[in-house]
Image (tube, rainbow, N blue to C red):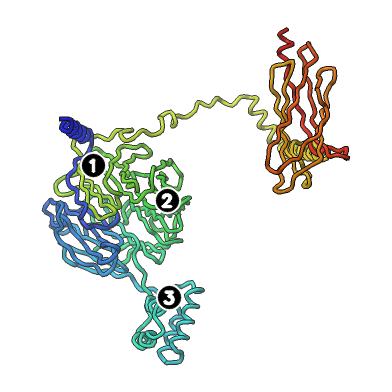
Amino acid sequence: MAAASSSDSDSCRAESKEANSKWLDAHYDPMANIHTFSACLALADLHGDGEYKLVVGDLGPGGQQPRLKVLKGPTVLTESPLPALPAAAATFLMDQHEPRTPALALASGPCVYVYKNLRPYFKFSLPHLPPNPLEQDLWNQAKEDRIDPLTLKEMLEGIREKAEVPLSVQSLRFLQLELSEMEAFVNQHKSKAIRRQTVITTMSTLKKSLAEEDAVSCLVLGTENKELLVLDSEAFTILAKMSLPSVPVFLEVSGQFDVEFRLAAACRNGNIYVLRRDSKRPKYCIELSAQPVGLVRVHKVLVVGSTQDSLHGFTHKGKKLWTVQMPAAILTMNLLEQCSRGLQAVMAGLANGEVRIYHDKTLLNVIRTPEAVTSLCFGRYGREDNTLIMTTRGGGLIIKILKRTAVFVEGGGEVGPPPAQATKLNVPRKTRLYVDQTLREREAGTAMHRTFQTDLYLLRLRAARAYVQAIESSLSPVSAIAREPLKLHAVVQGLGPTFKLTLHLQNTSTARPILGLLVCFLYNEALYALPRAFFKVPLLVPGLNYPLETFVESLSDKGISDIIKVLVLREGQSAPLLSAHINMPVSEGLAAA
């Protein structure tokens, strides 16, 4: 009976949690075997039938066997192998012909593979780069048999370490070979021309001339050669080429190519560069304190996730607007756009299994998943307008649908900082006295600084003199003599007129005992009386604390007190080894009488 009641309460709790959630759980398959990241996910109506499909550039388990997968609902519709690991996937309209079905572009290695109706349509390869002239000369010598393979390897390694132009793939493969395989490799490739090829690191789309959703778009490619290329979608020619100081890894695009556009590229050197139309070099630079892990544009704000577990908001000119600290490391980011309500927000997948949704620095919602999410995609899927697709670290697939009645409210997630934290302080107006003081500091700033430095040096000098005097007169409770390492501590107990004075004397040496010490008390005999003002100290064993007790009698009935000095001396020496000044308390017994 108890088990039945507990199961009923659990089911009720689950139902209430589902009712309070803004999301419907449409599908969860932990064994979907999808390993990808957000840049390789895209949603599009590939057949023009109103049924949106999910395009996945799958890395494969362990980065092996990359494949292009197209999903319809929870099932895989088509699957085809890829020659290299995918870098990004995007859907775009190539022309104005009917039916208006979008094309699929998949960046992989040095090529962009374009598909129409899920059939291969065009393959664009990045132009070859000029080879290293020294490398070209070495392979020409190897072709004429003027150098042996071992010499070729040594000289290529020297070029790789010092040259600014990197080696070609052919030379890099040659350097990885064993000695027995080098000669056959040289004979096979020495007649071939040296070609240096770069690869694509990121890709996005840019509207050509109109801002409409069904307008023709261009492809924007970021390459390992620190360049951005704008590619025409009809002729597949390079319309514009821009240079960057580092390799781009994340790309955000806004505007139209024929009118005005902005490109924001997050690079491997930890900076974000902003480029505009007709600019071959970056116009603005945003320096981050850590490496970027994601870049999303929300309206006119660039939201950057960093390896310091934080989100930052910047303008396109590089001004920082806000910073939000995350409870765990950020694994992936993407844009959430709810067109029916005009909402744009940023989604961040965290290492602790949470997906957080932020509008600026305000937390809107928190989704908890069974496993850490590695990719996110939001948009129309199937016939549902607001669908969230997530893939997990173990290859799982999670599909959630946003309820039509769901409204994201500020503070709808977890409790964040109080609103009063963002309220500006009511700073009072500047008074005439403040203005006069400011003018005086401007005019006499040098003299004020010199006076401050003089006083500071005098303070240091007086402190040093007092320290030297304390050492010389043994006014410290710790002995400064290496031969007599002692430590003294005094405790006064009692209310009066009789006090108990306990001296704790300790030998701080490691192995040498100390013998022949004396303790002497100096005090005002009109105020205090001690039974023994001078006595010998027994042998001090290293490391032990020796309590030496005596009684102090207060003679004054006026409620006054004085200092009693305790000196520790060596027999036959007048200078004390160490000393202590004891501030005696007022005798409460005599004061009460």
Residue 142 left/right relative to 46: right
Alpha carbon of mark 1 to alpha carbon of mark 3: how far? 48 Å
Q: Residues within 10 Å of mark 2 (few under 14, many from 20)?
A: some
**Label whose residue precedes the other's in the sequence (2 or 3):** 3
View extreme (bottom): residue: 145
**Label whose residue precedes the other's in the sequence (1 or 3):** 3
Secondary structure type for disc 3? loop
**Residue annotated with mark 1:** 339
Instruction: List x then y, in percent, for residue 481.
Output: 79, 44
Quarter holding residue 39: bottom left
**Residue annotated with mark 3:** 167
View extreme (front): residue: 538
Secondary structure type for disc 2? loop
Secondary structure type for disc 1? loop
Q: Kindly identify the residue that appears in the image at 24 percent across and 37 percent down.
A: 341
Q: Kindly identify the residue that appears in the image at 30 percent across and 44 percent down.
A: 355
Q: What's the mark number on residue 315?
A: none
